[in-house]
Image (cartoon, helix red, strand yellow):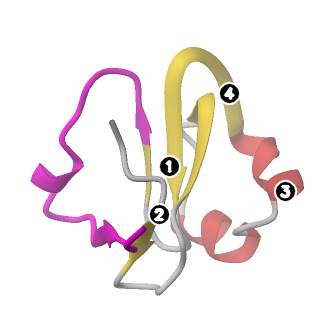
Amino acid sequence: RTCDQLRCTACDFRVSLFNDYIWDQSCDYLFFRNNMPELSKLRAKMIKKKGARAYACQCSWRSIDELTDLQTDQQLRWVCGKH
């Protein structure tokens, strides 16, 4: 299970998640900084992949296609935004 209320403590943005997508390898900080949270603009770098999930805030992004503990990633500053 994953929290659907993740929030980034670095950029203070809500973390968006997209089922059955991964991020293109060409994604960079400026892409997310300029396009979050507008899905129409984000789609330009989203790749369809069944069973995967793409996560992003304004300063970090991850593509996950297997069970992963995001808390072990020291670079991420994502926390539960409470339910």
> Of all residues shown, which one is farthest toward the right?
40
Instruction: Give whichever of discs 3 and 2 has the lower sequence position.
Output: 2
- Cα gap from disc 4 to disc 1, whole angstroms: 13 Å
Q: Amino acid at mark 1?
A: Tyr
Q: Nearer the viewer, mark 2 or mark 4?
A: 2
Q: Position of residue 19 (x, y in %)?
A: 60, 31
Task: Name the residue carrying label 3.
Answer: 41
Task: Name the residue carrying label 2.
Answer: 5
Instruction: Give whichever of discs 4 and 3 has the lower sequence position.
Output: 3
Q: Position of residue 28 (x, y in %)?
A: 54, 59
Task: Name the residue carrying label 4.
Answer: 47
Q: Is residue 78 left or right of residue 58?
A: left
Q: Quadrant of the C terminus?
A: bottom left
Q: Position of residue 23 (x, y in %)?
A: 57, 39
Pointer 4 and pointer 1: residues touching (CB < 8 Å)? no
Placement of 56 over or under 43, stated as above or below: below
